[in-house]
Amino acid sequence: MFLDFYNLREQPFGVTPDPRFLYLGRSHREALASLYCSIEAERGFAALIAYPGMGKTTLAFQLLERLQQASRTVFLFQTQCNGREFFRYLLNGLGVDSQGMELVAMHNRLNQILSREMLAGRRFILAVDEAQNLEPEVLEAVRLLSNFETSRNKMLQILLIGQPQLARKLDSPELEQLRQRISTFARIAPLGPEETAGYIAHRLRVAGYSGASPFSPGALRLIAEHSQGIPRKINGLCFSALSLGCAMDRKQVDAGMIEEVVGDTRIDSLQPPRMARPVPTRPAAFAAERSPLSSYPAMPKRGFANWVLGITGAACIAVGIGILALTLGGSGGFTQSTAGIWKAWGASRVLDSATPEGKAEAGPAASSMNVQAAELPHAGSRPLASANEDAEINSVIVQPGERLRQVILRTIGVYDAGSIEAIRKLNPDIADLNHLQPGQVVRFPRNYVPAAPAPAGEPESAVDKNGSLSHPE
């Protein structure tokens, strides 16, 4: 504790509603005066409404302390209850054992106590804290307590203390009778910057502190700013700041220490940090020059784990295409589509084992259906190509519903007579390029360069307007 360090008799920023530490700012003075006058005039009902931490309970204790000489008071804070339980709490506060008593018997016992206090010349005050938690039927039971009266005097003064939710409940149509009986609505506003400094000085003085303020002007300004003038928040910041000053052996708290306290008391700073997902770094192989036919860089050599993932991915694609082909074209299309994919996958495994390192270079992915850039024989009729020839060839699997034109455009981006002629030379085993089958593997030139425009009078293309070969050779 920092009491000895700052020469304090007691804790100045405690958490209990001690009336000695009540600082009467402007709105606190007005609220206290309004409630005092309402009870002195025996108006029956009064309400004190403010946001949490504004000092409602402390102000209520101060009010009851001023009135205790000529009054008997009961302070209730158990508001999570029904009507019967509320009456039991009230009688227990009066020292009456209500165990086993019926509601009528409790009413009669309360009436006896109120009559005795009135004959003794003392008023009876019931203060209900956290009244916003009372259910409407319990608030209606509280209203019925106002029926304890004589032709001239109210035998019971009731003070409802709560947060703004209480005002919203009282404004409901079902509680109209209770709202009409409340003669005084007192409110408490947050403290301003000057009142915040006065509040801190007052509590330090009550706790026995003397001398210059342990808070610098900058620290007081930040306390007012971060607490928003709410006394409970002011207490928390001041307690933590003085504790930090004691730990640092510093008699005065400055603005930097307040900022540190504010940072330590933020809720998000107490939560475990989220694990940031690592950003993948680009391998050196990604810095290689990009192919003019694709926007993707050349992939590095695959390790064993990537090789296994590649096989798994190819198998999943094969199953997906097979199901799609079965849906679109029946069982015959399914058999033909999956046959081509499995041939392509088998050939890719052969090529992987054919390189000196047991791996194969992967080419640019022209589409999600592309396979690695190496020669993939369609029906096992062609031998494996040389490494130089593989570097110039890109093999693509035909997707369901695609025609030659669509495959050419998504692969090399140019559809003319030269591209068709190059494809025909690379695929002599395909009898009819006009009728490609789903799953069929077609070889394309990787670095195709369009030919110069044909001279006037000569045909520019070997395709018709529908995208079919006009005179395949």
Image: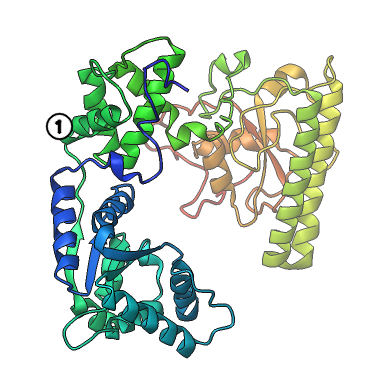
Say which of 256 and 45 sits in front.
45
Q: In this view, does 417 lie to the left or right of 134?
A: right
| Mark 1 neighbour class, 10 Å CA radius: few under 14, some 14 to 19, many 20 or more | few
Q: Is residue 332 visible?
A: yes
Residue occupied by mark 1: 194
Vertical order, 337 against 450 (above or below):
below
Give x and y (percent) for residue 18.
Answer: 35, 44
Give the residue at x 51% y 47%: 463
- The quadrant in which the C terminus is found is top right
Give x and y (percent) for residue 231.
Answer: 29, 40
Q: Is residue 22 left or right of residue 11?
A: left
Say which of 79 and 392 sits in front.
79
Residue 355 found in image quarter: top right
Give the residue at x 13% y 45%: 26
Q: Element type at marker 1?
A: helix
Vertical order, 17 against 291 (above or below):
below
Residue 127 found in image quarter: bottom left
Vertical order, 321 against 454 (above or below):
below
Q: Is residue 382 visible?
A: no
Give x and y (percent) for residue 369.
Answer: 65, 43
Task: Give the total of numbered labels.
Answer: 1
Give the residue at x 66% y 54%: 435
Residue type pointed to by label 1 = Glu
